[in-house]
Image (cartoon, grey):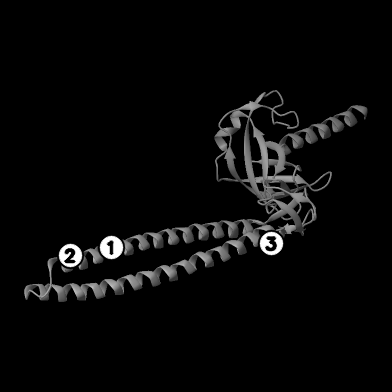
Amino acid sequence: MNNKYIMLVTLAFAAVACNNNNDKSDAYGNFEATEVIVSSQANGKLLSLNITEGQVLKAGEIYGFVDTTDLFLKKQQLQAQKEAVSSKISNITAQIDVLKQQKQNLEIDKDRIVKMNKDGAATIKQLDDVIGAIDVINKQINSIQTQNNSVFNEITGIEKQVEQISTSIQKSYIRDETAGTVLVKYAEQGEITAFGKPLYKMANLNEMILKVYVSGDQLPKIKIGSKCEVMVDLNQTENKKYEGIISWVADNAEFTPKIIQTKKERINLVYAVKVLVKNDGSLKIGMPGEVNF
């Protein structure tokens, strides 16, 4: 009776050990996400920052802004300066019109003197005087036109400064280019910020990255783009399964991280593999996971 009992217990343990070996996953690791630190692109007082840790941000939405009073006043000053410089163009144009009219009158006098000279009623000196006066007016017109070009260049320079300030004002608004979840908030409304100073850290948690480590003999069955089975602990006895896609495989081997279990504990060198997993809200950064290839 005792021998029979011992045999049954031995078989039971053997079955459990067999099941445990069969249930052992191919690789283990932890979930990650691509984290982005959003920094200020302007200097000044942080007038608004309407975010909280854990908040999901939408792409393109404005969530705060830095004081732009100085920039706004500088822009108004430049616009007034542009108007003042533009008024010079009207004066220059009026001067050129007057000189052109004088030139036109001298051209008429020139034609008249040429005819009179043929009839002996005018002298060569009179003709030379008219031609000289026309040359002087041409030089005056060229000189004023040069001033006009200088004014246009000055206006162009002011417009570029206005565009630069407008861009700086736009950068004073805090917005996200991509959607994501706020992980850490570094600044608060009312603080003084500066260009490059971190405001908050965010990550897109809709798709998580499970980074696992595999041995060299596992590499042949791992292909980028192929699907695999991902598991996380549901409770002490059950796992929750997800579908994963292999997105990256390391080119070089590295020593096994201390926190990572491997299929063969005696293996020192392993390869890192990244698996993309759609997040249903249950996956968190740092959560352990398993993979079956």
Mark 2 / mark 3, whichever is N-terminal: 3
> Could you tell me the amino acid type at mark 2?
Asp
Mark 1 / mark 3, whichever is N-terminal: 3
Residue 172 vs 3, above or below: the answer is below
Disc 3: which residue: 62
Q: What residue do we see at 16% from left, 68% from top? A: 127
Disc 2: which residue: 128
Q: Specify the quadrant that holds the N terminus.
A: top right
Task: Indicate the position of residue 166 as horizontal and vertical percent values.
Answer: 59, 60
Disc 1: which residue: 136
Q: Secondary structure at mark 1?
A: helix
Residue placed most toward the observer, 81 or 163:
81
Residue 69 vs 204, above or below: the answer is below
Task: Indicate the position of residue 18 as horizontal and vertical percent values.
Answer: 75, 34
Q: Secondary structure at mark 2?
A: helix
Q: What residue do we see at 75% from left, 55% from top? A: 46
Q: Quadrant of residue 293?
A: top right
> Could you tell me the amino acid type at mark 3?
Ile
> Could you tell me the amino acid type at mark 1?
Val
Q: In the image, which is nearer the foreground, mark 1 or mark 3?
A: 1
Q: In the image, which is nearer the foreground, mark 1 or mark 2?
A: 2
Task: Indicate the position of residue 172 as horizontal and vertical percent values.
Answer: 67, 57
Q: Residues within 10 Å of mark 3 (few under 14, many from 20)?
A: some
C-alpha separation, residue under disc 2 versus residue under disc 3? 73 Å
Residue placed most toward the observer, 50 or 281:
50
| 47 left or right, relative to 8 | left
| 94 left or right, relative to 235 | left
Q: Residues within 10 Å of mark 1 (few under 14, many from 20)?
A: few
